[in-house]
Amino acid sequence: MSSYSELPTSRHNNADNNDDDDDDGQEQTSTGRRNQLLKNDNPPATTQQQQQQYDSGWPPNNDEYTKYDPVLVKETEDYLDIKDIYDNEQIIDARFDPVQRRYCKLATENNPEDAGDAAVFANNNNNNNNNINSELKQRSQKQTSCNPSRLPLTPKRSKGGAAQSTSASTATATKKQLPTVHRVLLYNSQSPRLSRKPQSVLRSLGQKQHKNSKAHVNAGDAVPTVILVEPESKDNSHNHGRIEFDRNDDFDEDDDLDDISNFDESDTASVCSDTEDGYRAHAYKMTHSSERFLSTHTTSTGSSILTSQSSEDDLKNPESLLVPSLFPYVPPYLAFSSNTKKGPKVPAELHRVLKWRVTNIMPKVVRLILANSGMRMLKKTNDWMGVWGKHLKSPCFKTIRSYQKINHLPGSFRIGRKDSCWKNLERQMHRHSNKEFGFMPRTYIIPNDLCSLRRHWPRYAQRNTKWIIKPPASARGAGIRVINRWGQIPKRRPLIVQKYIERPLLINGSKFDLRLYVLVTSVNPLRVFMYHNGLARFASVKYSSKADTLNDRCMHLTNYSINKFSSNYSKNEDVNACHGHKWTIKCLWTYLANRGVRTDCLWEALRSLVLRTLFAGENGINNMIRANVESKYSCFELFGFDVILDSDLVPWLLEVNISPSLHSELPLDAHVKAPLVQGVLNTALYNVPPKLTQEKQKELAAEFSFPPGTQMCYDKRLYINYLSREEKVKHNTFTRKSMEDREEYIDAILQNLTPDDVRCLIIAEDELARCAPLERIFPTDQTYKYLKYNDIPRYYNRLLDAWESRYANNRTEGIALLRDYCQNKYHLQVPAPPAKKDWSVKDEFILKPEEAPARDVLVDA
């Protein structure tokens, strides 16, 4: 209980306790915002009418009370509510600049948590104290005939924290005790309410109030002095990774931001338009060609690649475990079987070295495919050839041996985390335009962007904008909800606040999103494959835009992990049917095509969205790979892109997943994901580990009918990342900044191919030949327009651009040229390796020091 005998209720305290929807569990107390400032042994007497006015939070209409705001009564002491002093704009404007408001906490030694937001009186200012004492004496003489008591300074506190009596403090005090200042919160203007007004209005208002304040000061009014404390640059008492806000001021006073009755459209006219405005018009043109609505016959027979491929063909088993390369003197690749049928027989000597490390998160469909393909599944081994597991910290990639392959890229969180993805897209918007990179709804990263969101909130409130809040690195719908009020946003925890797509495309009254699967086998050069199928995931409750439905997660969220628990959820047992709450993208495309939608244009818009997202994070990912990966063979990444279509068929990126779920609870999931996993493993080009002797390799080559002299195991010379002197000169020549015109390199870069060039083109052609049922979307002969999004020119990207420009429509000629190079073993000419460096990284795939690979000089650009 508070020690106050009677506390007048202030309008600020009412506002402080209205935010019941704050998720941070913020303590809200009426005394947490009050601090001792002044006290008087004999408080002035008040009438019943005046006391009622105190209870209402406003001073009585009496001349003797016009100079100060209401006082807090504590038996024989006077207390001044400092928050009311802040609202008294005349007093504030008389002492400091009306443009910025700065206030701080005054805390006691024994209980710093009770420190609230208050201005601190300067007790070391004798003149001001004398003025305050004089004023209070005059007021006390009018109320009582007894001699006025002497008004002390801020009461001294003992070690226990209790305030000493007035007489004791005046008699024994030998040194003034200054208040303890802990934290500071800066406002752009005198109060949150005034901060919403334009600066021109504030200046005129401040000048008018400043004149009135001068009149009061000249009349002899005592004005309290306020200490303004600048914020510290760093607070070592808190985690520097966590941004702390004032504990009693989680912007609770700003709950009235949702009340738009006080705002005009002109108040926010200066705020810039949203990032997605330019993109919407651009994407609309892309998905709505001049022949958007075609006849049913034309659309269903002449549409895109999606409807032309059969899922039954995707699950065919290979005829042999080893498939030869397109080029001589290149080791063969492993061919993976389906999840339903055992693959070809594996020789015992070969089966012995095909070791896969099993992890707890390895999906069942992956295990079935590996087992049917003749792999050995081991839980405890460091001598593995492949692993499908969780993402590693970037330095842990250094321990991967050159012949080992993992299903992740270091630095993929650059687009895999929601906050990092937005930062990279926003950076590209500044470099290029919103039209090209504004495909992610406007996002604010909390708490860093809290002030920016608060500044723009009135404009959003006028438009009744809805928002979706998400943790930055969660999955399966955890922590996601839709809100429309300022008080519903947690102010301290890390999360993102993203504009909600309020007019989604509806099918049968329900909203849905698309899960697209994208494989990246290399970042430099960038090689991207997109699965021709995917999932359309529907919400289990029909959509409504009414505000009272925002708490219905099964209406506004499409995650299967959420909707499968709904009583309305309907399973789709027929993979070719358009019913239930989960469809294949092929079925969705058929559904849209039958209604006259150009699905080929829509698919092209999705390709463009995927590539722009990858280019946004390409620079950061490439830097992490150069610093942590020894071999170009070691890594690939399967991304899951979540995209939603609005009512105009404009695609919007929601998030990117670096570990998309491959669990197959339903037959429809297995129908989509089993061919995907099989295609990913085949496209990744797995080699036999270099654990067989030359004699065993000769026997194996004869058994599989390969030409004599074929190396059957992994050859590290094909994947080195260091260059000869001549190769470095060529790289520097074709990546100089002055070479901006594509015509300058399109022919010249192919004239004298180096061994490193041939190795790059060999891998690209072998991947393309084995990528079904995936489609390579970069590089192609039409994707050169995306190269401008590279932060710096990439030599390998330009090399593949020139190669595709020349041989995309005559690939046989290009393959024949490379075969001639390989026949002479030109691609196996490698420079001497650079000096080795120390190796001291440890992780769960730890290696012995003598087995650790050497760190070589990395390729520039």
Image (tube, rainbow, N blue to C red):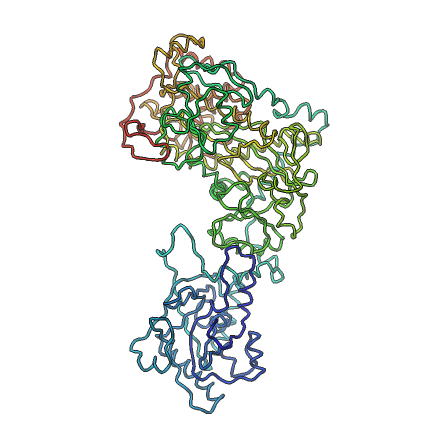
> From this viewpoint, is residue 622 visible?
yes
Classify 857 as above or below 455.
above
Tell me residue 197's x, y (percent): 55, 62
In the image: residue 263, left or right of residue 785? right
**How many labels were placed on the picture?**
0
The foreground one among 4 and 547 is 4
Q: Residue at x 30, y 76 (%)?
A: 175
Tell me residue 209's x, y (percent): 51, 72
Q: Most extreme residue toward the bottom, as rendered?
A: 145
Q: Quadrant of residue 688?
A: top left
Classify 703 as above or below 860.
above
> From this viewpoint, is residue 732 visible?
no
Classify 2 as above or below 661.
below
Tell me residue 646's x, y (percent): 63, 40
Quarter of the C terminus within the rendering: top left
Tell me residue 144's x, y (percent): 48, 89
The foreground one among 70 and 648 is 70
